[in-house]
Amino acid sequence: MRSVCKWSTVQAIRAPARGARTDEILAVDRGEGAINRARTGRFDMKNKNVIISVLFMLMGVAAVFIYLSTTRQSSSENRDKFYNSDNAEFINIDDSLIGYYEISHLPMPEGEINALYIDQYDKIYIGSGKGLFIVDTAGERLKVVALEDMVRNVTVSENGDIYTASQKRISVLDSAGTKKWSFDVENERTYLTSLAVYNENLFAADAGVRTVWRFDTSGTLIGRVGDKDTAKGILGFVIPSAFFDLAIGHDGSLWAANTGHHTLQNFRPDGSLISSWGKSGAQTEAFCGCCNPVHFTLLGDGCFVTSEKGFSRVKVYNQAGEFLTVVAPPSAFKGPKAGLLLAADSHGTIYVADNYEKTIRRFKRKEN
């Protein structure tokens, strides 16, 4: 019986047969017994098409990279130009819109101010480094309290207890500055940026977790405020940078700056949304940049004072969020366009911490 070979091997040999070119190859497939001719150096069309396709893809990737690089550079240049002090259209605000004037400066403690608050008795609390400085409205130092942690924010309850926070720890002092107790917020992403207290509720804004923690005044966690809930019309906090401010309204409700949405939002203590206001834009009445307003406070009549970074401007809005006036235009500030801490006393004087000038600047309403 004739055996059939089950394997197939291709062997290339030189065959200078009659009429054949020396660069031809005889491919002998012993399994099939077929002889095929091929020319050395001939491109297979399929491989050629693949190579051409790859080249076009590489050219396309290179074109996209160049476009994105150019666009990014152009965007950066435009942004720098936009925020440059020569941009008179937005930097130099018309005098008719400025309703305040600067009356005096208060000396700052050594180091940068990280926290500023004024209580119901017009005592000023300044957080700088690991120190809490308490002064009066004339700048006279009343007390200095040394703490274990950085004082990044401070607030005071109606009974006089002082609440301070570092990145993760909240501490409670009595009115004399003696530490009562402290607790840590147990989340690896926590970055506390603001505190607000009302009755038995202690609220802590967390820019790392992008939420507002609600504790009772003993430090027990009750819940969270402002987390996204589309069914209830709550957008959730968009916090692109470490600015996330809180304040208590005159009705005891909570106000929070949703900086990525350029709005101030009003919540009940249980987290239900009451209202919000604000809009994005470079116009004087709007909030500009990626994330503003970075700080705000309330006046005695319920009006809001806001500050922005990028354009370092301070403005006043009424209780409904309608623009009223400018306290200080961008041209009033020098140096890095960082956020300006705010506070207001019982007389309506507005205090602005200017770390570049190393002073606390005081602004008073112009007489009509």
Image (tube, grey):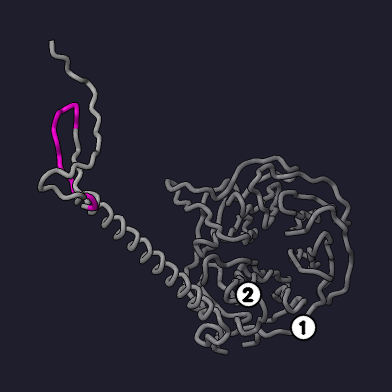
SS at mark 1? strand
- The front one of 39 and 351 is 39
Q: Quadrant of the N terminus?
A: top left
Q: Residue at x 79, y 64 (%)?
A: 128
Residue linked to disc 1: 104
Position of 302 relative to 101 (above/below) = above
Q: Residue at x 21, y 50 (%)?
A: 23
Q: Amino acid at mark 2?
A: Lys
SS at mark 2? loop
Q: Amino acid at mark 1?
A: Ser
Q: Residue at x 84, y 75 (%)?
A: 139
Where residue 287 sits in the image (x, y, percent)? 52, 71
Where residue 31 sits in the image (x, y, percent)? 19, 26
Q: Residue 42 in magenta?
A: no
Residue linked to disc 2: 337
Q: Quadrant of residue 53?
A: bottom left
Q: Identify the residue at the far left of this view.
A: 19
Q: Which residues are magenta?
A: 29-41
Where residue 267 sits in the image (x, y, percent)? 56, 53
Q: In the picture provided, is 192 more to the left or to the right than 230?
A: right
Q: Residue 30 in magenta?
A: yes
The disc, 2 or 1, on the residue closer to the chain's N-terminal end is 1
Where residue 321 sits in the image (x, y, percent)? 52, 69
Label 2 and label 1: CA atoms lie apart by 22 Å
Q: Residue at x 66, y 44 (%)?
A: 188
Q: Identify the residue at the far top of this view.
A: 1
